[in-house]
Amino acid sequence: MIHLSWRDRETVKKIKCVHTDAKKFLVNNALTAGKIYDVKNETEEFYYIIDNTGKVGGFYKEYFQDA
């Protein structure tokens, strides 16, 4: 149930979105290329960030680089 408190957790690091060219998913509504996001949690494959909708979302690491 850790996902219920991610919005209130401290930021792990900051990352910059480098592109929104997704093969399967529609991510350009939730991410903006060039914008810096706060990482709330990280796994091997995903960053969990507060996206443009104001909610915590999980996105593949391929869309980001360290800021």
Image: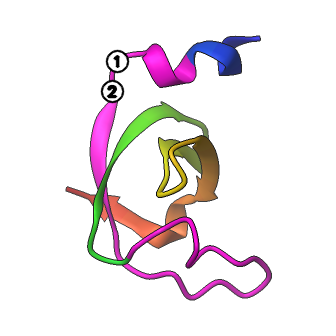
Amino acid at pointer 2: Thr
Residue extent of the magenta highlight = 6-32
- Quadrant in the picture for the C terminus: bottom left
Horizontally, is 52 left or right of 59 in the view?
left
Residue 38 sits in quarter = top left
Mark 1 surroundings within 10 Å by alpha-carbon count, few (fewer than 14), some (14 through 19), many (20 or more): few
Residue farthest to the front, as pictured: 53
At x 62% / y 73%, what residue is drawn?
Answer: 27
At x 36% / y 78%, what residue is drawn?
Answer: 33
**Mark 1: which secondary structure?**
loop
* Mark drawn on residue 11: 2
**Mark 2: which secondary structure?**
loop
Magenta part, dominant SS: loop
| Residue 25: percent from left, percent from top | 76, 77
At x 58% / y 73%, what residue is drawn?
Answer: 29
Inspect the magenta stretch and tell me whether residue 28 lies in it.
yes
- Quadrant in the picture for the N terminus: top right
Horizontally, is 10 left or right of 54 in the view?
left
Amino acid at pointer 1: Glu
| Residue 59: percent from left, percent from top | 61, 57
* Mark drawn on residue 50: none
Inspect the magenta stretch and tell me whether residue 11 lies in it.
yes
Residue 45 showing in the rendered view: no
| Residue 21: percent from left, percent from top | 56, 88
* Mark drawn on residue 10: 1
Above or below residue 3? Residue 65 is below
